[in-house]
Amino acid sequence: MGLKEVLKPLGAWRQIARKPHTILVPKVHREAAERYRGFHVNDLGKCIGCGTCAAVCPNEAIDMVKIEGIEGKKGDSGFRPRIDYGRCCWCGLCVDSCPTTSLRMTNEYIWIREAPDDFVYIPGYDIKGFEQKEKGYRKDKEHSFTDYHRVPMREKEPEERLQTFAEVVLGYTEEEARKEADRCIGCGLCISGCPDRMHIPDYIRAVASGEYERSVNIMYENNPFAELCGKVCTRRCESYCSLGNEGDPVAIRWLKRFATERFSDLKEVIRARKQELKDKSVGIIGAGPGGLTAAYYLALRGYKVTVYEAMPEAGGMTMAGIPKYRFPLPSLKKQVEFILSQGVELKTNYFVDPEKFRNLMEIHDAIYLGVGLLKPWKLGVPGEDHPNVIYAIDYLRKVNFNESVKIGNEVVVIGGGDVAIDAARVSRRFGAKVTIGYRRRKVDMPADREEIEGAEEEGVEIWEKIIPLRVEDAPEGRVKLVYGKARMVDQGPGRRPKPVLIEGEEYEILVDRIIVAIGQQADLTFLPQEFAEKMEVERGRIKVNERQMTSISGIFAGGDVANRVADAISAIADGLRAVKGIELYFQGKS
Amino acid sequence: MNIIERLKERFEVLIAEKKRKDLLIIETTKKGLIPMLFYLKEYEGYRTLTLISCVDWIEDKKFQMSYILWNFRMKANIIVKFMLDRENPDFETVYKLWPQAEAYEREIHEMFGVNFEGNPTQNEELILEDWDNIPPMRRDFDTLKYSMEKFGEREPKSRINIRKEISEQYDEWRRK
Amino acid sequence: MGKDKFLNEKPEKLTYSGVFKKIDNWARARSLWVVAYGTGCGAIELRPTFTSRFDAERFGMRMVGTPRQADVIVVSGYLTVKTLKRVIRVYEQMQSPKYVVALGACPINGGMYYDSYNAINRLDLYLPVDIWVTGCMPRPEAILAGFKRLQELIDDGKADGWKKYIEALDWYRGNQRKIIKNWRMPNYNW
Amino acid sequence: MSTEEVRLFIGPQHPGVTGNMSIEVLLKGDTITWAKTHIGYLHRAFEKLMERRIFIKSFPLVCRICVPESDTNEENLARGLEELADIEIPERAKWIRTLVLELSRLQMFIMWYGGIAGSMGLSTPVQWGIGDRDYILDLFEELTGGRVYHIYILPGGVRKDLPEGFEERVLKTMDLIERRLPEYDELIMDNAVEQKRLKGLAPIPKEWVEEMGITGPVARACGFPYDVRKNSPYEAYDKLDFDVITEDGCDVWSMLLVRRREIDLSIKLIREIVSKMPKGEFLTRLPNVLYWEIPKGETYVKSEATRGEFGYYIFTDGSGKPRRVHVKGPSFIHGITLLERLLVGQNIADVAPILVALQICPPEMER
């Protein structure tokens, strides 16, 4: 130590000559970094109120509130996040877990108030002036807490499928199923899409944690045809999945299928509590999914239930209409047997006519009509009575009951719904060359997207904008379909464009069979005159109230015959609802 | 002979698990703990006490006491633990072996209510001041409830369970 | 010992007004000394604020070691009960007029520690806060903007939390005593 | 000289203490005869709060445990949970984590370097230290989106990739800091006052180091080559080339020297990390964080913070929340056991430099 140590520190004086590095805040506004986690903004239109941000917030800073001008609808809870900046810690977990990416952060950071109550804020609703800021923390979809990629379902190769009526999809392995189920964020918006309002997030979570038995039990709380739905449901829930906004929705249907298929004997799995027997009996006409659902829950509630079925097997449309490559027979048998084991009596080959109906009204305290739609709509064109024109539901029923049907080598299917696709794919399995003619465009087809893709993979050709004009006889036992082309006429926003025939153009196609699949209508001829008069019918369907009661008290109806949707899950929902209705009806009566 | 065998030879070892190549977990009994720590310190070279910790296994009515030691030459940690009765959490101090144990034990006494016989300062307040409830780190102490009662909240949060709310809302639609 | 002004008397009315009061406020606003008490994590962002990068001394602000010379106390984030007691003590030692700035989310509504048994949730129950700056932690720029706002308030003569504190002392004391069990607090007089 | 003992409370509101803590001393004249550390002013019950939060929600919490050096906490907890849940993280994530940790250490050391001078009333380096540290905070802000609390290291990797051109900016900042360091040295190391006051101040008996569990630069200043980065390497430290820095003086001056050399080492390591940074993925997909459950287990993970060994003792019980997380901050031993013994016999004026030299960070003592 010496003079050097005394003098050297004086070198710091050279700083005087340097330019200071002070940032002259607030004269100079320094913008925060590109990724800065500043105040939140929310795109209210994109937000679906799933509440994931509130669930992941470590500080309970986010509260879901109802705000003016936003109503709940299917796939949108109507709630929006409200953030308390007296709680927030700007960690950005909410942004990283937002499934719609509507919530993000700007790089704004100054929020100064004199009162402590001014820190509660609904991003997107309370306008603060920084909504348009582009910079700030955003979600990187591939590196966030949300997994947008569905575990792909393995399927048989198209060539292999055509050889057999075995199931097309192979199902998830346990690992795949748990991985897929774990994607679910549990928001519950899917419930809004399900007619039966199944507890979807609960049973998905149970699958994810490996509690399959619990999962199936949750399903059976309001759906005794869980396995059926796991295979052939129209899965409208998936179109409201919050992950579907930015990625693939959770494969709810396949997960249900996975969980239910694990158990061959449902009696050991389902722990439904049976109530004491009651002195009331219910007759159910039609052993379809809706009728059997009603039967199952009525039996659980202690009522005496008898189901009358015209066909030799129970199952209704799922037995007769759905091809076995989608829904194998053993699976249906298993579910029906389980329902019957709850004390439901089934009478097959029991065709109800007016006389029998009167009798049923006598012996039962209530009647549930689950008769379905049996009468096919006709094309309404000249020459339709040609023997080579057949109707898809008749065709499918015969195939399913192993009756022989000749369809030849070339087939044209008219229609665009699931039945049309089924008929086409079944025909492909018989080796025919199949064309589907639909009057709208392919995108307008009401059939399931995956089904359409599957059909196309199997070699079904789909012709758009086809309007049949007439059917003509052709030599060698063939038939000629004469058709015109349609153009789509816009019907204004929110409505499907309407196909309009282009006049003066005619085309023809020569085939062996024409399969008509343009829908079915109710056949209510079994009703005796006095009931048929009183029964209100609206546009071909029986009119029911919110408890599924028809205009005649004591008679309930559900399923295809009563609703406009005409799918299995709606029928099941109707059946479940009717159970409550019947119970209330009994209570009111006694 | 490795260390686990040497320990098993001398003491009661309930569980011995090699977690990583430098982390060994040994479970022993209340009686065997202090002799084992002494042995580890004096003969095995685990001369440093890194941490004393306590875990509340309220379901089993036990406190787990863990002592983490560090061997500078072997570059390895060892966790020695034992289960202490939760109803009578009395134990002895290891302050004579390591001076820092005094402060660790003082903290555990404050946070869990474990009594360390022979620790001179354990009854002094370390972290809390004028504490008026059960020791706060015990699992049966509800900190949210305590906080809300004592400190309040600016605007009571609705704390709605959005998930439940959603499914109820849809149930209502169904009833319509 | 002088007369115990603090507890028994209302704040004296200023005998001068008009332009003199304005000058007074102008001068006060431009020499805010902040007591050097890092009560919580916000202290980490106070350091850059008061040193060369952001240099709050440009606005006449600096850190000062003793509360007796300070005008502002910055409650930098959460307050534990133990610290609250010290903060109240520091605040009461400060000379009027005095101002409180609360940084971060925690003093507003508990912040991250809303469920902690040891951190208070609402500072306004215990101390009269003039300016709230939210953020976790607020950046030095935000803190400076907060001080800037405080200066404006003082300029307008609106930053009168200290008067409210004296007027509503019983209320504040009641709240304070509710959570501070052992009240060993001298009554300061100055 | 009076023989009467005076009881003096230093802190919590005191410019000389390194945060919100206080020391109670008995004085005989200028000499301390007894000392006691009082903590608990910053106790927020992190460990309790973590027990009632799902794993992912703990991350915004833990970085508040040590305010100036938050990344160590995140990294420790993330690594512990990865070990218990058996998650492999990508190579690039390890390197980015190492980079963040080193940057974090560097900014802390620079602030400390100014702080040790400030503790003796030399306030110019304080201004410099905090000012230059801010350039590293700018880097953090760009990388992580937060200046102080980064919440950047999560289980599975890191949250975001390095931005475009980030490496060059890191190197530029390193050049800037390296250019500035000789000026610090002139003012601190070559300063007669500093040398006179710090050399031989508060000597630590060598046998205390192992006995008390002293770690970090304090242990290294006593000749113990104890550095977690070398002894039990974590992340990418085993692929880096460095030696443990030791000094033999056992006094505050040696601690100063160790930390001064640590700054150089950190800059060297950061350059090395940047040059070796591998390409590829930086985050493995976690299970759904809202429902993430980790099987029952316990582990102790540790890393080298600027102050010493930082450890996390983590318990899981198969549920979605940790059963217990015990955070072992190095300051607990340094600030209570060591400080209470070290202060005895020292001059009251030296309390501040000793506190800064031990680099006591109160929030990690009481959590």
Image (spheres, coloured by chain):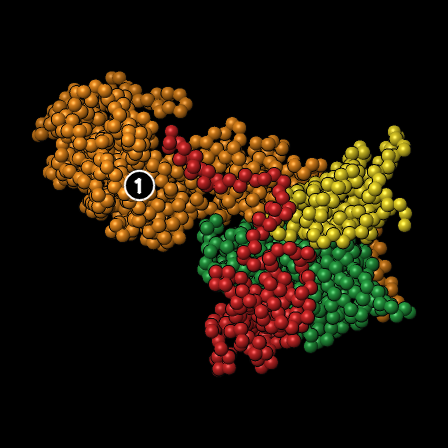
Q: In which quarter of the image is residue D116?
A: bottom right
Determine the residue positioned at 79% across, 40% down. C166
Tint applied to chain B in the drawing: red
Q: Which of A68 and B167 is in front in this view?
A: B167
Quarter of the N terminus of chain D within the rendering: bottom right
Given the current orientation, which residue lies at the most extreme left position? A476
Residue with the mark numbered 1: A223
Determine the residue positioned at 17% across, 29% down. A362
Give the percent coordinates (x, y) of residue A18.
80, 50
Determine the residue positioned at 54% across, 60% down. D324
Give the percent coordinates (x, y) of residue A377.
21, 25
Tint applied to chain D in the drawing: green
Give the percent coordinates (x, y) of residue A455.
26, 38
Query: Which three-letter amino acid code belongs to the residue tagged 1?
Result: Asn
- Mark 1 belongs to chain: A
User: Is any atom of residue D91 visible in this view?
Assistant: no
Vertically, is C185 above or below D207?
A: above
Give the percent coordinates (x, y) of residue A330.
20, 47
The chain displayed orange equals: A
Vertically, is B42 above or below D182?
A: below
Q: Nearer the viewer, residue A394 or D55?
A: D55
Count of all numbered marks drawn on residues in the image = 1
In the picture, measured across the screen, residue D184 lies left or right of residue D327, that is right
The chain displayed yellow equals: C
Quarter of the C terminus of chain D within the rendering: bottom right
Q: Which of A549 and B162 is in front in this view?
A: A549
User: Is any atom of residue B85 visible in this view?
Assistant: yes
Q: Quadrant of residue C161?
A: top right
